[in-house]
Image (cartoon, rainbow, N blue to C red):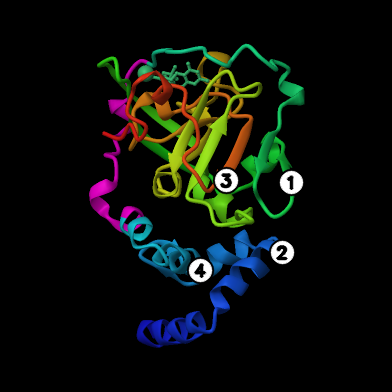
Amino acid sequence: MSDDFDRRLARLTRRGFVTAAVAAAAAFGGWKWLRSRARIDGAPWPLRRVLEANESLASAWFSPKRLSPEFKPSQRTRPRINGHLGLAENADMAQWRLTIEGAAAPVSLTLDEIKSMPRVEMITELRCIEGWSTIVKWTGARLSDFALRFPPANAAEFIALETPGRGYYVGLDMASALHPQTLLAYEMNDQPLNWHHGAPLRLAIPVKYGIKNIKRIGVLRYSASRPADFWAERGYDWYAGH
Ligand SMILES: Nc1nc2c(c(=O)[nH]1)N[C@H]1C(S)=C(S)[C@@H](COP(=O)(O)O)O[C@H]1N2
Ligand SMILES: [Mo]
């Protein structure tokens, strides 16, 4: 069955069908459709083909070596608060939206719309570049699910994330952005995010240092070139992986 599936997939791919399938899926509210398709190695197959178009992306997605360790609930530690850049501006929660730039059409999402996407939980380490770390349970939606539902209009190699008003901003390479443990998180340790931890929506990206785990995201932008990054501009490594 799986051999047959692979053969069919290969044939369809040669005809450029997959690109059409992704576009059609996006048009018909298709992320549910995408997720219901047969899965290979855990990724919905249209996404897998897209990733395979770029081997480095594919290896980043599929290499288990790049999975960040996950922990038991009892291993969680007391949260710390670090960094308030960009949190003060646009403080009215009722007005908050996540804006996606660079998709086929402008997108502006409420938190409820984000919560209606598949809910993912993980208990991972948040490691600050200053030398401390915490073990935190995050709940949210995979950033890759957003990329499937609102794909970039043009070829994009990066995703930029910014607080409302751009007091803080990070850039992500696409492989890290689409990593299965990269979440747009709305809960921390089973509670809605509080203000200091980035309410209503922040990034949880355990394959990167804390600096990339941007709190209070207002804008998500696809980009063909490497986006500006607050701490990279101040001398830290742009990738900030660990
Ligand atoms: N908007 C915003 N996000 C941010 C920061 C910041 O100053 N502003 N600091 C970063 C740093 S350096 C770390 S270590 C983590 C800390 O997250 P926490 O406060 O939830 O522990 O948030 C990151 N995200
Ligand atoms: Mo940090």
- Does mark 1's beta carbon lie closer than 8 Å to ligand 1? no
Label whose residue precedes the other's in the sequence (1 or 4): 4
Percent position of residue 114, x then y: 64, 41
Residue indicated by mark 1: 106
In this picture, residue 94 sits left or right of residue 65? right
Highlighted magenta segment, given as a residue range? 60-78
Residue type indicated by callout 2: Ala
* Local secondary structure at mark 2: helix
Quarter location, residue 195: top right
Label whose residue precedes the other's in the sequence (1 or 3): 1
Label whose residue precedes the other's in the sequence (2 or 1): 2
Residue type indicated by callout 1: Pro
* Local secondary structure at mark 3: strand
Q: Residues within 10 Å of mark 2 (few under 14, many from 20)?
A: few
Check the image and report above or below for 84 versus 46.
Answer: above
Q: What whole-number distance in Å separates the C-alpha atoms at marks 2 and 4?
A: 14 Å
Q: Residue at x 66, y 42 (%)?
A: 100
**Circle number at residue 27:** 2
Label whose residue precedes the other's in the sequence (3 or 2): 2
Q: Residues within 10 Å of mark 4 (few under 14, many from 20)?
A: many
Labelled pair 2, 1 in contact (Cβ < 8 Å)? no
Q: What whole-number distance in Å separates the C-alpha atoms at marks 3 and 2?
A: 19 Å
